[in-house]
Amino acid sequence: MYANILVEYNVKTLDKTFTYKVAPKIKDKLKVGMKVKVPFGHTYINGFVIGLENKTEEDLNNLKEVTEIVDENLVLNQELLELGKYLKEKTLCSLISAYQTMLPPSLKIKNQKNNYELTATYIILNEEVDIEKYIRENKRSVKQIEILRNLQKHLKILKKDINSSSLKTLINKNVVKEVKEKKYRININLQLKQDNPLTKEQEEVFKAIKDNLEKEKTFLLYGVTGSGKTEVYIHLIKEVIKKQKQALLLVPEITLSTQLVKRFYERFGSKVAIFHSALSEGEKYDEYQKIAKGEVDVVVGTRSAIFTPIKNLGIIIIDEEHSENYKQEKMPRYTTIDMALFRSKYNQIPLVLGSATPSLETMARAKKGVYTLLTLNNRVNNATLPKITIVDMKQEMKKRNPLFSDLLLAKINNCLEKKEQVIILLNRRGHSTIITCQNCGHTFKCPHCDISLTYHKSANNLRCHYCGYTIFKPEECSECHEKALNYLGTGTEKLELELQNNFPKANIVRMDVDTTIRKGSHEKIISSFQNGEYDILLGTQMISKGLDFANVTLVGVINADLSLNMPDFKARERTFSLLTQTAGRSGRSNKKGEVVIQTFDPNNEIYKFILENDYNSFYNYEMAFRHELDYPPYYYLASIKITSKDYNLASKEANKVGNYLLKNLEKTTIVLGPTTASLFRLNGIFRFQIIIKYKVDNKLNDVLRKLDDMYIINKQVNLEIDTSPMTI
């Protein structure tokens, strides 16, 4: 037997399989998709078995032998092997890079560790021994008899629970035996709850998808915030389980999974696996093995969960499908929806995309009939959408109210008096965003990136939010040495202090990247707020969607223009989505909700759509803009970044790449650039960018692949190709 092996080296020249003989001792165990150790050059490395054959055209005298299976528990099944090839084709990555992306850290190709298995040692009776006879013959051994009677009653007992020398005697005499059982790090058993009955509107949506459970079909479930999309998901998953299949539910952020996972444990018990980046390596290993062995009915996870080895997939659901967290920004730069569409087609099952603010690309496909559009127009339990008020902060500044308008302060105070809760959104972390010298005008910037340092008061340092460069807070200007530093701009840390000053009796909790670094911090903050331990939840965009708090009746948005003024074609779409989703956290139960949005640009057209919760009008308005300027969904985009530590070299090569594209792409394809990237210097690297706009270009993939090959061995200049950029 011969094996075609893909080796661990992520080098373009080695992006192919190598043929090996299979040693007789592993012939019966070896399967396609297994990780093996093979001789390569003068050393031994790992590789994946991509194929097995009984004959080969290779020269048998030159073939080396594969003799060792690294992990018999890891087998990339046929679907995942095909998905890896698709991922390579879509993103122009190497095949080994694709498979690496699909595996948790504990199972990656180079990982040599085998200590992720966690076991518990139990004591059981030896069935070959007459226990009653042994007891009669050892009447004086009271402790031994007690252990044996307990085992007769409970069948097995954890060894660590028997603290007795008598146990050692029983083991030595072979009266009892030790057995090891696989132990999972995550074991949650909550009391099961009854399903909530579906509303008439939910029932119609549920039935439309249920009738297509055996087909490859994509649905867009567009439902206003609080319309009960999750309840529809749960009912659909129960239908899938009835057919002896499994379900995959994806959420964009770990924060969203906290409340959602609890709901799923309450409905499906221990048959739920979770999979996201906040799990430890051991926890990921356990959950991956549970999924691979078919021990669960439902997998709930973030982006990477799309690659989990679900054997009998029956439905894929992507909640908050508009979120940009579903895009992987590092190579391979894949979009989760692309991967989900592949698995939907492979398994002939439905894909459900859910959102209160669908991306324009997704809605355009639904309106064209490529996807099937389903809508939920009403909140459950007859709850009404919150009343939204727009506040002009230019007028408030005249009253010397730089952070909080009089209206927002009054409404927060009113909520606190009624023992109701408040959510405040400011999509910028830290204390102050710009530190300047009043004497000479010097601004503290990152020496490696083209960006100002942010002041973090709790850590007393200045930090770059891109590369992590950090210095202690200076007492004087580094240029003129005057003690005249001025702290401008506001982040969540500063806002928290201001809130505490205004409402000294209120319990306030902040949720941003800085407060959620530790494992379990997301869950702790959300649970504490849900239990009423805090009155005000302040945070960045991680609190804007998916969270459900019955006692929240007020949402305040500080500096709503932050995302609106970004130099990107998706700025308005992001702002509409962020503000609509955040507003949706208010008034989700029987209490009426309110929203106060503070802006310096109250006459911007976008606020009109947000006030009226009018997604369709926003969609038409934004689509006209996209059409005028040839942006998605009317055109596809591709992005090429040319980067180097040498400015002149990066500039020179960027022009070369631009000229190559103009000469080799279709005439109808638009090539913009090269120009400097929006963040021109990042971590000491100069960055130029070229944007490609096209409708149909049959040459594009080949041209991009050739460009990639040209620069693959260039150690001074790097090409970053993104075939589906989310930002430009």
Image (cartoon, helix red, strand yellow):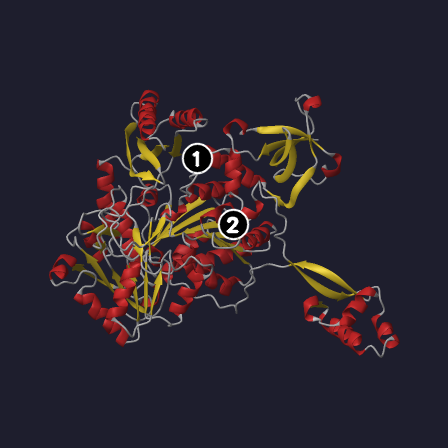
Q: CA distance from mark 2 to mark 1?
A: 26 Å
User: Visible in this render: residue 593?
Assistant: no
Q: Are marks 2 and 1 in contact (CB under 8 Å)?
A: no
The image quadrant of residue 642 is: top left
For residue 637, above or below residue 437: above
Number of residues whose C-alpha sits closer than 10 Å to that of mark 1, classed few (under 14), some (14–19) or many (20 or more): many
Q: Residue furthest right?
A: 137
Would you say 145 lies left or right of 43 here?
A: right
Label 2 Cα crowd, 10 Å radius (few <14 / some 14-19 / many 20+) = many
- Pick the front one: 672 or 591: 672
Q: Is residue 308 visible?
A: yes
Q: Quadrant of the N terminus?
A: top right
Q: Secondary structure at mark 2?
A: strand
Q: Amino acid at mark 2?
A: Gly
Residue hosting label 1: 91
Up the image or down, 287 lies above or below 699; here it is below
* Marks 2 and 1, the one that precedes in the sequence: 1
Quarter of the image with the C terminus in it: top left
Residue 328 placement (x, y as % from top left): 42, 43
Q: Secondary structure at mark 1?
A: helix
Identity of the residue furthest to the front in this view:
481
Residue 99, percent across and down? 53, 39
At a point 36% along the width and 50% down the height, the residue shown is: 470
Which mark is on residue 314? 2
Which mark identifies residue 190?
A: none
Taking the image as shown, residue 270 lies to the left or right of residue 662, namely right
Task: Please provide percent x and percent y for residue 703.
Answer: 39, 25
Mark 2 vs mark 1: give the one in front.
Answer: 1
Q: Amino acid at mark 1?
A: Thr
Residue 53, horizontal then vertical, whole percent: 67, 30
- Disc count in the image? 2
